[in-house]
Image (cartoon, rainbow, N blue to C red):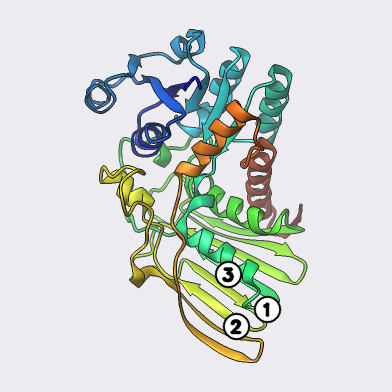
């Protein structure tokens, strides 16, 4: 079977830490080319991915007939234009999260992908976090009874303004609501579908911050409250997931290990990749069929590689796409409603 030839646009953190190593770990792909304008990045590419051609302009990727799939790993405000050009050039497209800045942009890309009969998807990789997979397993087990509340945190501590990054600049799509919030929204919608309404409190807490660096978002469901939180001034983080039901609770500390492993140079094909240490396993306390159950739940294995495996299956074998652009558009719409909720100081219906 012919390998899918990939053109990766962007070799910042997303391209260098996530996409390039994962693409290189899936047998159905070949990292054909990487686009970067930075000499230091070009040197890393030559060392780690000698088979890849280095390009300096995205237009070179769009014009290359050998490339089947374009992966866009650039600042959020550029996603729409680059994805639009890639689809118009007849390429399949994977956009790093967040999909676009607005839901209208997302809809335009969806319509173009349908007209071109090309795959369009988004790197919502945290559906394959070990802890999220474990939370999903606990919910589906019924061990907690009727679920009444889920609280999720994605916190960091950076009490200064980091220089040299667009994520700290006053540009469209910057700030933690788009950067980290879209992961939490995607996880909630994956579990429970679209909410009935959204309530949000959104702030810039650090002095001189030009971007959103703290948010609390409540997604309202029938008989279920989902709270999503992120902040840059959380020195001592609390639980990552708190899951409450009428029979018991599940609490999970710590973050999925895959980002740290990738950042340290580990590849998804190495033994132990995606496996959480036992001290990070979540704890359950519940009553199930008359029995008291208390203890640790073994974390599922994290598997970002499965997102790319699905893309290969869609292109080569007509499999169903897991992360659809329609779902990614919904995530952006919920972020828009959160911003509206903050601006109007009220709960906004979905």
Counting residues from the N terminus, which is met first, the one under dot 2 or under dot 1?
Answer: 1
Residue 244 spot, x, y in % from top left: 60, 76
Vertical placement of residue 310 versus 197, above or below: above
Decide which of 225, 137 is in the foreground and name it. 137
Where does the image place residue 209, in percent across and percent down from the top left?
41, 48
- Residue located beneath label 2 in the image: 248
**What residue is shown at x 62% (from left), y 29% (from top)?**
317
Q: Mark 1 points at which residue?
A: 145
The residue that label 3 is drawn on is 138
**Real-space Cα separation, disc 2 to disc 3, in angstroms:** 11 Å
Q: Are marks 2 and 1 in contact (CB under 8 Å)?
A: yes
Q: Can residue 236 be seen in this view?
A: no
Q: Can residue 296 be seen in this view?
A: yes
Inter-mark Cα distance, 1 to 3: 10 Å
Seen in the image, is 173 located left or right of residue 191?
left
Q: In the visual, does 149 lie left or right of 156?
A: right
- Mark 2–mark 1 Cα distance, whole angstroms, equals 7 Å
Question: Which residue is found at the position 65% from the left and 22% from the top?
Answer: 118
Disc 1 element: loop
Indicate which disc residue 242 carries: none
Q: How crowded is mark 3: few (under 14 residues within 10 Å), some or many (20 or more)?
A: some
Circle 2: element type = strand
Q: Quadrant of residue 319?
A: top right
Q: Where is residue 142 in the image (x, y as percent from the top left)?
A: 66, 74
**CB atoms of marks 2 and 3 within 8 Å:** no
């Amino acid at each position: 079977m012919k390998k899918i030839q990939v053109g990766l646009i962007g070799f910042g953190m997303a391209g260098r830490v996530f996409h390039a190593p994962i693409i290189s770990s899936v047998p159905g792909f070949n990292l054909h080319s990487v686009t970067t304008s930075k000499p230091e990045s070009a040197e890393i590419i030559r060392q780690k991915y000698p088979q890849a051609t280095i390009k300096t302009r995205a237009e070179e990727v769009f014009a290359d007939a050998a490339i089947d799939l374009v992966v866009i790993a650039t600042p959020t405000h550029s996603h729409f234009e680059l994805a639009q050009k890639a689809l118009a050039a007849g390429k399949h497209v994977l956009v790093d999260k967040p999909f676009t800045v607005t839901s209208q942009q997302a809809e335009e890309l969806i319509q173009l992908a349908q007209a071109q009969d090309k795959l369009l998807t988004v790197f919502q990789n945290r559906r394959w976090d070990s802890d999220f997979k474990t939370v999903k397993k606990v919910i589906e087990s019924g061990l907690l009874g009727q679920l009444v509340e889920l609280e999720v945190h994605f916190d960091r501590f950076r009490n200064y303004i980091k220089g040299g990054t667009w994520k700290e600049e006053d540009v469209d799509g910057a700030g933690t609501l788009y950067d980290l919030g879209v992961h939490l929204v995607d996880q909630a919608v994956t579990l429970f579908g679209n909410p009935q309404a959204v309530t949000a409190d959104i702030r810039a807490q650090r002095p001189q911050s030009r971007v959103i660096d703290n948010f609390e978002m409540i997604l309202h469901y029938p008989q279920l409250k989902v709270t999503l939180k992120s902040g840059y001034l959380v020195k001592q983080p609390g639980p990552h997931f708190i899951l409450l039901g009428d029979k018991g609770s599940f609490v999970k500390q710590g973050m999925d290990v895959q980002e740290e492993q990738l950042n340290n140079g580990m590849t998804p094909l190495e033994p132990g990749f995606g496996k959480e240490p036992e001290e990070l396993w979540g704890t359950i306390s519940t009553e199930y069929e008359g029995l008291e159950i208390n203890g640790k739940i073994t974390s599922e294995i994290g598997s970002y590689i499965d997102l790319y495996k699905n893309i290969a299956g869609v292109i080569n074998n007509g499999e169903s796409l897991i992360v659809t652009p329609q779902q990614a558009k919904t995530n952006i719409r919920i972020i828009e409603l959160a911003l509206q909720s903050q601006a109007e100081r009220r709960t906004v219906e979905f």
